[in-house]
Amino acid sequence: MKSLRHAATVGAIALAGAAALGAAIGSALVLRIARQVVTPAPRKNDTDVLSIDTGAQTIELSRTPDTELPGRYGLYVDGTPGYVKLGAVLHADAGSVRRKLLTQIEPGAEVGRRAGFSGYYYLAPGELHLPYESVLIGTPAGPCPAWLFPAESTTWVIQVHGRGATRSECLRAVPVLHAAGLPVLVTSYRNDGEGPRTRPGSYGLGATEWRDVDTAIAYALRHGAERILLMGWSMGGAIALQTLVSSDHGGAVVGMILDSPVVDWRTVLRFQAKAMRLPDPLPQLAMDALEQPWSARLSGADQAIPFDALDMVARSAELDVPILLLHSDDDGFVPSDASHALAKARPDLVTMPPFTGARHTKLWNYDQNRWTDAITDWLGEQGFAQDSSLG
């Protein structure tokens, strides 16, 4: 009997130990997933360079949902060019895509096999051939570099880039906004690789970054702006929306343009978890961890992430300015579901022309004319364009 009791005790301890170990492993996995959500990630080399024809100035890439898209794009490459611009698709088969090079690659140039496909197209403001100046905006986190493209109007546009991106993402929109007579301020923010780094160096998913945009609004108002339009790309959309509902300067904001925006983070994170084949309930547990101050800090976040406050479908009644919402229904990274839900909740404010085929933040690249027309028409209809003929 004594040996049976001993065996039972050992078994119970073993089971308890296994359960504790399983719980520890599960907790570690949840925190790891949560950390990935808030940690800025380096640019991915997601494309294979198969060959380059320097005589014909063409490049052959592995075929992916991005590399097969029509339009103009960019490609980060290892080697001499560093960054090249891509033009039309000339040929495609099951495994490869051949595109026209819009950046000259000289014979003998060494280009690595792995590259990063990009929608930026323009990397630097000088490529736009428009007057601009580099400015610094003092924010609660520190000085944030910005580009200012001046114009005559007292209605300024402040552009906010997305997660894992830089200010260069926003340059595609400057020409259409400048053509409407609007000054454009393209700003950075904390932990984006150009703005100041906080101690953890993590994203707040809009819950902290809006304060930096708020000081950009204050900068614009000090320098002649009377009305502000906010334009946000991807996570920059979440930041812009938080700025609108949180800022003391919110009354100066008279409209918003959102490109492929994050309107509700829970929708986005569940979509991405499904794409990564993460089983339930891990995605929800990771979001729960980010909502609690102690576990948020263990996940590397500056502070707890208030997912309820970041759900702008639920908070749609608080919106009070016209919004142009541009989102491709095959986005593939930030699903358009929440954007459609916002448009349905506030049809009095939201204009959402249909787009498909353009994937994430590549509507300009995919169909520049239609994207430009959508912005130009909306600016004219809302009375924001300096030149009334643009409406």
Image: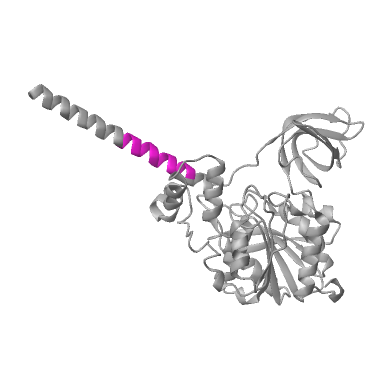
Left or right position of 74 against 161: right
Q: Quadrant of the C terminus?
A: bottom right
Left or right position of 105 against 288: right
Please say if 136 is above or below 153: above
Please say if 138 is above or below 391: above
**24 magenta-colored:** yes
| Residue at 65% over, 66% down | 216
Chief secondary structure of the magenta span?
A: helix
Foreground pick, 136 / 364: 364
In the image, farthest residue toward the right: 55
Foreground pick, 226 / 87: 87
Residue 339 is situated, as x and y percent measured from the top left of the image, at: 62, 60
Q: Is residue 97 visible?
A: yes
Foreground pick, 30 / 301: 30
| Residue at 52% over, 66% down | 314
Instruction: Determine which quarter of the picture holds residue 293.
Output: bottom left
Q: How many marks?
A: 0
Residue 154 is situated, as x and y percent measured from the top left of the image, at: 76, 75
Instruction: Specify the segment rendered in magenta.
Output: 20-33
Q: Is residue 150 visible?
A: no
| Residue at 60% over, 57% down | 337
Residue 242 is situated, as x and y percent measured from the top left of the image, at: 57, 65
Instruction: Determine which quarter of the picture holds residue 29.
Output: top left
